Image: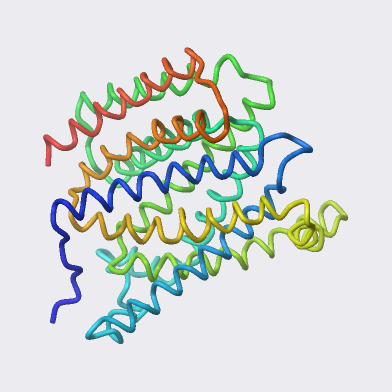
Amino acid sequence: MSDKPSTPSSLVTAILTFTALVAFAANSVLSRMALSGGDASLIDPDSFTLIRLLAGAITLWFIVGCMHFYQENPVKSLDPSSSFKPSSPWLHQFNKWRKWCGAFSLLAYAWLFSIAYQSLDTATGALVLFGAVQLSMNIAAIIQGQKPSIVEVVGSVIAFTGLGYLLWPNIGTPQYWSMILMVLSGVAWGMYSLLGRQSLFPVLDSAHYFSRSVGLMLAGLMVLSLAMNIDSVQLTLSNMLQSEHYGGVVLAIISGALTSGIGYAIWYKALTGLTPSKAAALQLSVPFIAAIGGVIFNHETLSLHLISSGAIILSGISMVLIARNKSC
């Protein structure tokens, strides 16, 4: 029997896709809800990130266990050495380090994401993150030898212009530096996504990435402890146990288990019924969903500057996706 996942029906694909996109947008809503308010935040970024990654790891390993139990040929399907298909000697060598690279990119994304949402509103953070992800993946495609068309180049320039327009008025402010951190978070997520494209069993690989990212974060906190003469690990763990942070802990668990762990698993299943170009195009809706969530749950308002810059960024990315779809 083939190990290739079955393709869901059009209706099931639509439901799975919508659910996954809402989950992605909900990560921004939940993070902003937990981390906004300065000293009045429900939890600190370090604790939020650590709990989110740990909850995601536990959830993904549970899903992997269920897959293992219900599949007819589970041993081969869950063989870690078969979960990545190298297409070149370089990728074969990279295969030895891919789990650590995936864990590092996941940690960079999640940690910077949490820090940035201390001062960014939901819609701005989601827009910057999404724009950075798409643009970084386009740049990676060019580096890998894919020659872009004129339309793709123009679309990328428009998207970069929109991102610059969004950043420009905030130069020198705390919000500007948070936007820069969110851009870096988006680049890290782009790297993580590129690794996912090479995976034959992305849920299994994601479980490995989440697990290792927890260890990397604890190591990072220990390095910060030595560098700053502060026990970052003990401080983070103690913050997680304080009653005033329980609300933030709950939001972090929801973000890690539900909107990250289960959300990613649903998205990977939806991808079996979507073309790459259609999947990329559908992700254009994530900033809009996040913006609506920010207005409803976080009582935010949408400025004209954010709406106009968002329209420029997304129109540029749309041009790239449309041109790429026609060339395929």
Residue at x-position 24% and y-position 26%: 319
Coloration of the structure image? rainbow
- Which x, y percent locates residue 96? 43, 72
Residue 113 position within the rendered picture, expressed as x and y whole percent measured from the top left: 57, 43
Residue 15 vertical position relative to residue 223 in the rendered view, above or below: above
On screen, 98 above or below 158? below
**Percent x, y for residue 269?**
27, 60
Judged from this view, the residue extending furthest toward the right is 229
Residue found 25% across the figure and 30% down from its top = 320
Q: Residue at coordinates 47% horizontally, 37% vertically from top-left?
A: 129
Q: Is residue 142 left or right of residue 256?
A: left
The x, y position of residue 200, in whole percent, is 28, 68
Q: Quadrant of the N terminus?
A: bottom left
Q: Residue furthest front?
A: 296
In depth, the one of 133 and 118 nearer the eye is 118
Image mark count? 0
Q: Is residue 76 left or right of residue 32?
A: left
Could you say which quadrant of the image residue 325 lies in?
Answer: top left
Q: Quadrant of the C terminus?
A: top left
Which residue does the image show at 45% across and 35% down from the upper left?
290
Position above or below: 176 against 224: above
Kindly indicate the quadrant of the structure image that contains residue 42. Answer: top right
User: Which of 29 and 118 lies nearest the eye of the viewer?
Assistant: 29
Q: Is 169 situated left or right of 322 in this image? A: right
Is residue 275 shown left or right of residue 144? left
Of residues 257 and 167, the one nearer the viewer is 257
